[in-house]
Image (cartoon, coloured by chain):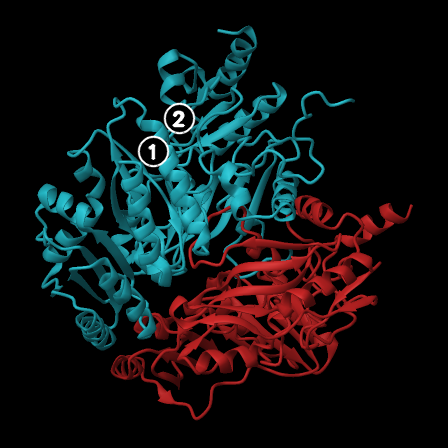
Chain colours: A red, B cyan
């Protein structure tokens, strides 16, 4: 008997019965986006269900931590580029919040990792979407819909992820050159982080190729990978990739705002000791045409700061999956109207 | 012509121009199907030249309570663009401008009718290309690629269309306009762009598409491996992946197609091989060189007769010409073919191939296989003469049996062609009722009217509680 399936069915039954469903993982992503509601807490089962290295795919309970998965894959020379800030995060929580890791420049966004999802729907049934193979266009792309949905369409219980061979060599180096010029000199760097003064670059591949590239870009080796800014109030700015350096420069003029930009991507990680500074950083982001997601702290800030695009269409999607607004209400702003309508 | 159709045609002509909406018998026949086998029936065919025309056409269809079907070049093989319910067919081939190329951000904005290969040609001088490369890339449109989430040989390493589409301007079924996704790395809320890619025209029509451009790799090596058994070729596929290599492309051709291609192109493929593998490795010089050696040793370990590494660009192009000419080659053998598309776990490729051959033998059909082995994407190709009495029945029965064999091996119904009409009724083979219900809810959220390309993807009865039919003799 598939013990994980039994545990998933129990999660689904609990989701079906609850009035307000609060999916819970390791608690590392609780403050991302809209505030977490109070209600019936549900936890997805954890554990590796099947792993076949020759398929480059792994099936896991959504409650498995990213760190645990990384260990199992590393034993076979593979990895899954989920890359959350904190590897104690569960895979389900990481996917539900949709935060891509800092190697996105090379490996693409988080949602490209997911092949199949199984989730508990509002009625308490287990629903499967996508498929187990690395290539698949059988029906609508439910995995991409669920990634970044904050648990408001269903509670992830099991996922199939795409893995990749771990690069045989990885090298972090830094230079005072502008990140644009670094990217022009390197072929597919995995990450180019910029803090306004220095560019820190991750190169992955054959040692000789990495060495040639590092010399071409004048990189000095770093002892440890750079650390993203920390602090009680954190956010993630998203702007057009060609606005990244301009917004970083604007942040540099703000006291109390620590930041690191992902060059070529358009993501800037922001941290502040004072909530007001994060608000100022959000204003600067919006002035440059982007938006800033609240990632941690800053209880006085709205989770997203801007009106969601295509809100009417998104509200229809939400209503189709969760007609009474019981799934993680508040994490995305679509539940209020549904709950009011359901209770009247 | 039915009088309602006349009014519909007149309204479309008034909005788009007389020449842009047509209903002559020749056009209705021509646009009555795509490259699949099912024939449909269009009421009117229109050829918008602007996004506004598309929105006008959709609104006029809505006013007349007619369905609408988007169509690019019509190269789809699953009947996704086949008109059902006498719809307005909206052909996007006149929307064929590359609107903007941003080399610094590696983004191109294109209209949906731009041909796949034309985009790569247009950005070649910048050292960039558009990665998804379906075999029909000379003829198929980017809009159609978005609809089917198209793949191609190089999707093994680079990912299918969904990984390369950043933003889509769409006309929804009610005629409203929306931008899904964006050039910024993240947008708040649900990934509507991700839902739209692969939705086969059932969620609306794309009018502008922003795609990611990929830098050309500095080093590319193409290898031809030649085997005396498909088991050895299959073991080599798994062995390469297990060695920690994800090639840019990893294609397999069986004995029959290898001979056919060699007779047609003369690419130097071994005519007596049981299977050949075409392997492409790309990246930086030393890494590629090491991978070439690793692939060579995996192949020799599995009894490869020869390992041929293309010496120069001309030889490399010739090897690829063989692979990409497969469909031209089979036209010399028989007038008709039926191309299947299904995916299995790559470790079960050989086992499923054996079943596919047995099915062909049982139905007395000629079967060839040329496919994306690296991602387990099978393309069994049945070659036949449709004038032979009773042949279609055997072709269809073989197709159904192949799909079942793939699903039984843990596979899926389609890797890159889509579901369309062809495989709609096979969806319950891989999905439970509650899975189909969730998909139907998503589709209905995008298009509550159900007028965007009806009858595609989801079989009747997908919505839980949907009345399928009243049993004969039932008391109601």
Say the numbered circle drawn on residue B339: none
Q: Residue at x 46, y 19 (%)?
A: B41
Question: Residue B386, image x and y in percent?
Answer: 27, 25
Is the Cβ of the residue at disc 1 closer than 8 Å to that at disc 2? Answer: no
User: Is B327 placed above or below A57 here?
Assistant: above
Q: Nearer the viewer, residue B101 or B216?
A: B216
| Pointer 2 residue | B33
Q: Nearer the viewer, residue A5 or A44?
A: A5
Question: Residue A265, image x and y in percent?
Answer: 47, 66
Q: Residue at x 34, y 57 (%)?
A: B351
For mark 1, name the chain.
B
Q: Earlier in the sequence, mark 1 or mark 2?
A: 2
> In which image quadrant can residue A235 be found?
bottom right
Question: Residue B286, image x and y in percent?
Answer: 22, 77
- In three-dimensional space, the C-alpha distance between marks 1 and 2, rounded to whole angstroms, equals 19 Å
Q: Note whether residue B103 is visible.
A: no
Q: Note whether residue B191 is visible.
A: yes
> In which image quadrant can residue B55 be found?
top right
| Pointer 1 residue | B395
Q: Residue at x 79, y 70 (%)?
A: A300
Q: Between tags 1 and 2, which lies in front?
A: 1
Q: Is residue B302 left or right of residue A179?
A: left
Q: Nearer the viewer, residue B256 or B246?
A: B256
Q: Residue at x 84, y 58 (%)?
A: A19
Counting other residues with Cα less than 10 Å from the Cα at mark 2, is it few (<14), some (14-19), or many (20 or more)? many
Furthest residue to the right?
A344
Q: Nearer the viewer, residue A11 or A212?
A: A11
């Amino acid at each position: 008997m598939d013990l994980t399936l039994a545990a998933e069915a129990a999660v689904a039954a609990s989701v079906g019965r609850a009035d307000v469903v609060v999916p819970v993982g390791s608690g590392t992503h609780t403050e991302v986006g809209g505030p977490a509601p109070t209600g019936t807490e549900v936890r997805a089962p954890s554990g590796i269900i099947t792993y076949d290295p020759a398929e480059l795919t792994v099936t896991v309970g959504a409650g498995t931590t990213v760190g645990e998965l990384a260990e199992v894959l590393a034993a076979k020379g593979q990895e899954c580029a989920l890359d959350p800030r904190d590897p104690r995060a569960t895979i389900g929580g990481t996917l539900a919040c949709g935060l891509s890791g800092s190697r996105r420049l090379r490996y693409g966004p988080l949602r490209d990792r997911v092949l199949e999802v199984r989730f508990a729907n509002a009625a308490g049934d287990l629903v499967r979407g996508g498929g187990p193979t690395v290539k698949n266009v059988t029906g609508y792309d439910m995995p991409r819909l669920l990634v970044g949905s904050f648990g408001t369409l269903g509670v992830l219980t099991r996922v199939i992820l795409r893995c990749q061979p771990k690069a045989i060599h990885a090298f972090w180096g830094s230079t005072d050159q502008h990140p644009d010029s670094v990217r022009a000199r390197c072929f597919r760097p995995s990450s180019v982080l910029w803090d306004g003064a220095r560019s820190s670059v991750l190169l992955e591949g054959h040692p000789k190729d990495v060495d040639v590239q590092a010399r071409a870009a004048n990189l000095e080796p770093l002892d440890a990978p750079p650390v993203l800014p920390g602090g009680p109030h954190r956010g993630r700015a998203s702007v057009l990739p060609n606005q990244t350096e301009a917004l970083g420069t604007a942040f540099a003029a703000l006291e109390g705002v620590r930041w690191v930009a992902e060059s070529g991507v358009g993501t800037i990680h922001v941290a502040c000791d004072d909530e007001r500074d994060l608000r100022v950083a959000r204003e600067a982001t919006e002035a440059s045409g982007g938006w800033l997601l609240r990632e941690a702290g800053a209880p006085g800030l709205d989770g997203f700061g801007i009106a969601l695009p295509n809100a009417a269409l998104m509200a229809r999607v939400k209503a189709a999956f969760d007609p009474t607004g019981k799934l993680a209400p508040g994490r995305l702003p679509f539940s209020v109207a549904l709950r009011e309508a359901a209770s009247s | 012509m039915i009088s309602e159709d006349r009014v519909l045609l007149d309204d479309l002509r008034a909005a788009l121009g007389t020449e842009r909406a047509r209903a002559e018998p020749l056009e209705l026949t021509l646009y009555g199907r795509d490259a699949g086998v099912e024939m449909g029936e269009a009421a009117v065919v229109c050829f918008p030249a602007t996004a506004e025309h598309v929105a006008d056409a959709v609104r006029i269809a809505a006013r007349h309570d007619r369905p609408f079907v988007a169509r690019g070049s019509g190269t789809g093989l699953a009947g996704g663009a086949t008109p059902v319910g006498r719809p307005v067919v909206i052909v996007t081939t006149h929307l064929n401008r590359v609107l903007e190329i941003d080399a610094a951000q590696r983004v191109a904005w294109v209209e949906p009718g731009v041909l796949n290969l034309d985009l790569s040609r247009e950005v070649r001088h910048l050292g960039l290309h558009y990665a998804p490369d379906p075999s029909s890339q000379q003829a198929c449109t980017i809009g159609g690629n978005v609809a089917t989430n198209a793949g191609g040989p190089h999707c093994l390493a680079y990912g299918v269309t969904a990984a390369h589409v950043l933003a889509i301007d769409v006309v929804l079924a009610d005629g409203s306009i929306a931008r899904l996704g964006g050039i910024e790395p993240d947008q708040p809320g649900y990934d509507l762009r991700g839902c739209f890619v692969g939705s086969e025209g059932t969620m609306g029509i794309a009018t502008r598409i922003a795609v990611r451009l990929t830098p050309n790799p500095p080093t590319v090596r193409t290898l031809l491996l030649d085997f005396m058994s498909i088991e050895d070729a299959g073991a080599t596929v798994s062995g390469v992946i297990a060695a920690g290599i994800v090639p840019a492309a990893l294609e397999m051709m069986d004995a029959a197609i290898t001979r056919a291609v060699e007779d047609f192109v003369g690419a130097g493929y071994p005519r007596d091989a049981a299977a050949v593998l075409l392997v492409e490795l790309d990246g930086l010089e030393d890494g590629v060189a090491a991978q070439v050696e690793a692939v060579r040793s995996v192949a020799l370990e599995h009894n490869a007769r020869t390992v041929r590494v293309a010496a120069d660009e001309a030889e490399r192009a010739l090897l690829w010409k063989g692979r990409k000419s497969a469909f031209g080659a089979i036209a010399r053998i028989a007038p008709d073919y039926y191309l299947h598309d299904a995916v299995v776990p790559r470790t079960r490729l050989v086992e499923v191939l054996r079943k596919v051959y047995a099915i062909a033998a049982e139905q007395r059909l000629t079967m060839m296989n040329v496919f994306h082995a690296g991602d387990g994407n099978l393309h069994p190709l049945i070659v036949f003469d449709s004038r032979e009495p009773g042949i279609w029945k055997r072709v269809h029965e073989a197709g159904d049996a192949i799909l079942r064999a793939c699903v039984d091996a843990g596979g899926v119904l389609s890797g890159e062609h889509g579901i369309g009409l062809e495989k709609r009724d096979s969806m319950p083979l891989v999905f439970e009722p509650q899975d189909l219900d969730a998909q139907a809810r998503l589709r209905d959220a995008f298009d509550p009217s159900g007028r965007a390309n009806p009858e595609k993807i989801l079989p009747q009865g997908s919505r839980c509680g949907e009345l399928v039919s009243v049993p004969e003799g039932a008391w109601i």
